[in-house]
Amino acid sequence: METKSRKLTIIGAGAVGCAAAQWAISRNICEEIVLVDVVEGLAVGKALDLSQAAPLCGFTGNIIGTSDYTLTKDSDVIIITAGLARKPGMSRDDLLEKNVQIVKEVTQKAAQNSPSACFIVITNPIDAMVYTVFKVSGFPKNKVVGMAGVLDSARYRTFIAKEIGVAPKDVSALVMGIHGDFMLPLVRLATVGGIPVSELLTQDKIDAIVKRTQQAGAEIVGHLKTGSAFVTPGLSAIEMAQSILNDEKRILPCAAYLEGEFGISGVFLGVPVILGKNGVEKIVEFELTSEEKALLSKSVEAVKKQVEKTGL
């Protein structure tokens, strides 16, 4: 019996979209990658460049660039990166009005061609944009998820590892909540080789790491001047896409739609989820402290304000 080939569409051939495509190729996670952009020729040229890396990285699939959404037909996973990037002095909220229109348009076209796909949303502000995709597509909640927690947790783990002087992969840490200033890097659950981080660092150093994690995106924007982070955001989305395409059942922190989990309803928020072939297969709940609940409620308030501005 012939197995169906796995297909990944990436909407937006800018820095994040191309980074995602590059990581997907290097990991050889699917048989077909479609790179889409509204700018004529942009996705075609970048796809050609990426495809020529195949002999060097071992990619055995096909990558095409296009502005034609019919070529995205029957995608298994669709990553949305389309939208404006942050510039110095801009908050993620500043992007909302313009990006909601872009995301609405690409969602309609993509959903029409791939009614069984899972959407992964990267466009900022993520928590509002993933809500936009959910509403516009009409897809079930498990099929729409936002990328944020994987990126934020990777940053958190990096900063902890550098401070202690250990391999980043040996740091286990979780960031929940909004992808913004009110995100919640959980200190209580952060460990290094199984040892609680609170046993290895002073409270002052932990507080500084938490603050740097919350401001990590702005720190990069401040240095780049004309753009925002792209390498790790692209990889974070591919980490999620790979778990869905290969039905890996990874537990990853993602912006998922909550209906009572953690005492929260009606918003997309960063929480640990199990990602498999059906998208978000389960939200992994655990008991939060009263302080953590209070901090998470700030995320909820901020997300609700963003969602109101979408007009959906």
Image (cartoon, rainbow, N blue to C red):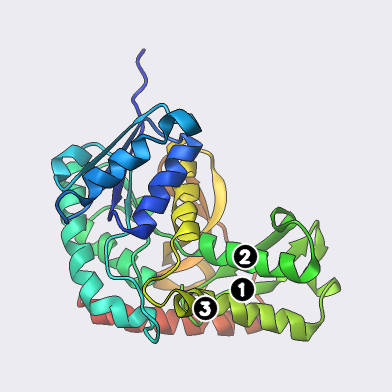
The percent position of residue 204, horizontal first and vertical second, equals 76, 86
Q: Position of residue 242 (x, y in %)?
A: 47, 42
| Secondary structure beneath label 1 | strand
Q: Dot 2: few (<14), some (14–19), or many (≥20) neighbours within 10 Å?
A: many
The residue lying toward the viewer, choosing from 156 and 165, is 165
Camera-side mark, 3 or 2: 3
Report x, y in % for residue 248: 53, 39
- Of badges 1 and 3, nearer the viewer stands 3
Q: Is residue 122 above or below residue 169?
A: below
* Residue drawn at 36 percent across, 32 percent down: 6
Query: Which residue bears the numbered disc 3?
Result: 219
**Nearer to me, 233 or 47:** 47
Q: Which mark is residue 185?
A: 1
Give the quadrant of the N terminus: top left
Whether 17 is drawn above or below 148: the answer is: above
Disc with the residue nearer the chain's start (1 vs 3): 1
